[in-house]
Amino acid sequence: MDKILAVLRETGISFAYDHFAEGEAVEPPFICYLFPGSNNFAADGKVYHKIGRVNIELYTDKKDLKAEQKVKDALDAASIFYAKSEVWIDSEKLYEVLYEMEV
């Protein structure tokens, strides 16, 4: 978790776990991150290597290549492999760029 928090701080973009509390919302771009599960390596009913899944969600109100580059640069500097996808959320009028990884 410390490594992910360091990556998020490095971007310089406001972030919160899962969501911003009511009344604490910030203007885009912003990041929400979460740990939706794990993919641990196990044998004989024992966990031998813990692997946590992490989602970093970058939200922008317009396509923001600079914000995306900040996230990519921070992940690359930390040597974290990620998969990236993107979707327009019409109800929120926001782009969500999702970076999925395991750490």
Image (cartoon, helix red, strand yellow):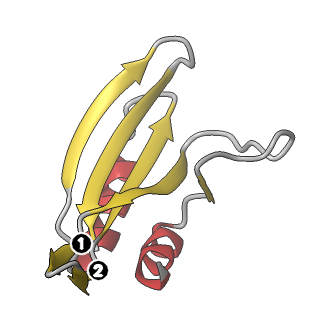
Residue at position x 49%, y 55% in the image? 33
Figure quadrant of the C terminus = bottom left
**Of the pair 39 and 27, the residue shown nearer to us:** 39
Farthest residue to the left: give it: 43
Circle 1 crowding by C-alpha within 10 Å: few under 14, some 14–19, many from 20: some
User: Image height check: is 78 above or below 29?
Assistant: below
Identity of the amino acid at label 1? Answer: Asn
Residue at position x 67%, y 40% in the image? 27
Residue at position x 78%, y 46% in the image? 21
Farthest residue to the right: give it: 23
Describe the element under mark 2 as helix, strand or loop. Answer: loop
Residue at position x 54%, y 44% in the image? 29
Identity of the amino acid at label 2? Answer: Lys
Where does the image place residue 73, in percent across and percent down from the top left? Answer: 28, 68
Describe the element under mark 1 as helix, strand or loop. Answer: loop
Q: Quadrant of residue 72?
A: bottom left
Write down the residue under mark 1.
Answer: 40
Circle 2 crowding by C-alpha within 10 Å: few under 14, some 14–19, many from 20: few
> Number of callouts in the render?
2
**Of the pair 49 and 13, the residue shown nearer to us:** 49
Farthest residue to the bottom: give it: 48
Q: Quadrant of residue 56?
A: bottom left
Write down the residue under mark 2.
Answer: 50
Does residue 23 appear to the left or right of 54 in the view shown? right
Where does the image place residue 65, in percent across and percent down from the top left? Answer: 32, 44
User: Image height check: is 25 above or below 61?
Assistant: below
Please report whichever mark, 2 or 1, sits nearer to the chain's N-terminal start: 1
Q: CA distance from mark 2 to mark 1?
A: 5 Å
Label 2 with label 1: CB-CB less than 8 Å: yes
Where does the image place residue 88, in percent across and percent down from the top left? Answer: 38, 21
**Of the pair 4 and 67, the residue shown nearer to us:** 4
